[in-house]
Image: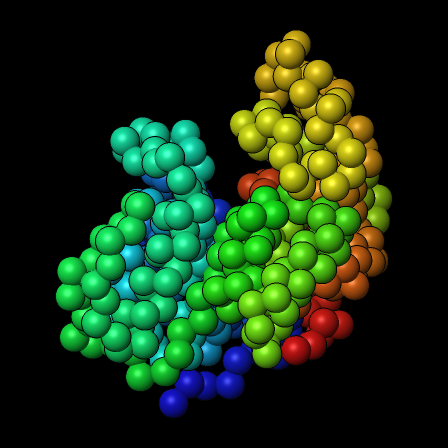
Amino acid sequence: MVSEQNNTRIGLLLGSTTPPEHIARLAREVEDGGFGELWIPEDYFFLGGMSAAAIALGATERIPVGTAVVSAMVRHPALLAMEIATLARAFPGRLRPGIGHGVPGWTAQMGLTVSSPMSALRETMVGVRSLLSGEKVTDQGRVHSFAEVALTHPPSERVPLYGGVLGDKGIGLVGELADGLVVSVLATPEYVAATREKLDKAAASAGRDSRPEMVVLVALNVTRDAAQAAATREAIKPILAFYLAATGPNPLLASIDGNERLAEMLTRGGPEVVHAEMPDEWVDAMSITGSTEGARTRLRCFFDAGADRVVVVPLVEAGAEESLATVRELLADFPV
């Protein structure tokens, strides 16, 4: 029997650079600190998402643990379903697998570039769900094929599947097939609101009765010291600039009409140019910085925009402890 979960809609994402030997301790601290859930990234080539989730689940008793997200092209859906089923059987009701396209540069390093990432995602979602449901699957897809594949140990209860996508086609597929959407870090409240509408519309068009859950990852650097609030914004800027330079124009920044300006910056350089010229409005839109009260207000913005759960990501390593202490004081303000 699963113990009662922590009663808040705010979770935490571990950083990709977390040493594997620290995962168990940090997972216990997240649970003991009152956070509602723990998510673990699978950024290639840092932590293995499924193995790291296994460590975290084994070290905790109550909180759900999710992967944000594994690539639909890195594992065959039969292998992924087997891994999910193994953990779901061992830790019933606590696993939240997230599946997405993966960063193209990383998947290309493994020779896993495909002509239709959407086909890979659909085939993975459908195949994994069928196998977890105890079905025997035979199918010839554009990317993945199955020949009389069935799990020996399917889970005894339904495992929720989450999609990690950004564009409209992916959101439509998640609304059709998945239990929830994991919205990438750097999302803005404007992006969340528009995506909530698209997700619900896709679910309704597919004839679904349930509303897919939206889990929003939010970059964080906050403090309990009001005198240091402005410094938290400056400290997170270079990290946001690094991500923006790496991704280039994207749907998240498009939600605040920033893509044209970013594209122009990138013609003149990389992260250093973005850092030097990034407007404060971008930082405010794509992250939570400032003091305790400012953090409370910004968290409400994401929930008001349509997030069901907000997962904070303390991007500034030097300020992580202070950021988490600040957010812990707010957990009770956002009950399940």
Instruction: Decide which of 97, 324 is in the foreground and name it.
Output: 97
Between 7 and 167, which is closer to the camera in this rendering?
A: 167
Q: Is residue 130 visible?
A: yes
From this view, report whether residue 251 is shown above or below residue 311. above
Vertical arrangement, residue 48 with respect to residue 336, above or below? above
Marks counted in the figure total 0
- Residue ID at (71%, 42%): 286
In the foreground, 64 or 21: 64
The percent position of residue 319, horizontal first and vertical second, equals 63, 44
For this orientation, the residue located farthest to the bottom is 1
Quick check: can you spot residue 30? Answer: no
Which quarter of the picture shows residue 273? top right
Residue 294 point in image, percent of width and height: 82, 53
Question: Measuring 17% from the left and 65% from the top, which residue is drawn there?
Answer: 149
Residue 195 lies in what quarter of the image? Answer: bottom right
Could you say where residue 321 lies in the image, as x and y percent from the top left?
59, 52
Q: Is residue 105 left or right of residue 51?
A: right
Q: Residue furthest top?
A: 268
In the depicted view, which residue is nearer to us: 334 or 120? 120
- Asked where in the image residue 263 lies, by quadrant, the reply is top right
The residue positioned 38% from the left and 90% from the top of the image is 1
Horizontal side of 50 relative to 246 (left or right) equals left
Residue 270 vertical position relative to residue 63 in the rendered view, above or below: above
Q: Determine whether 50 is above or below 158 in the image.
A: above
Q: Position of residue 87 (x, y in %)?
A: 30, 70
Residue at left offset 45%, top offset 71%: 160
Quarter the C terminus occupies: bottom right
How are the colours assigned in the image? rainbow
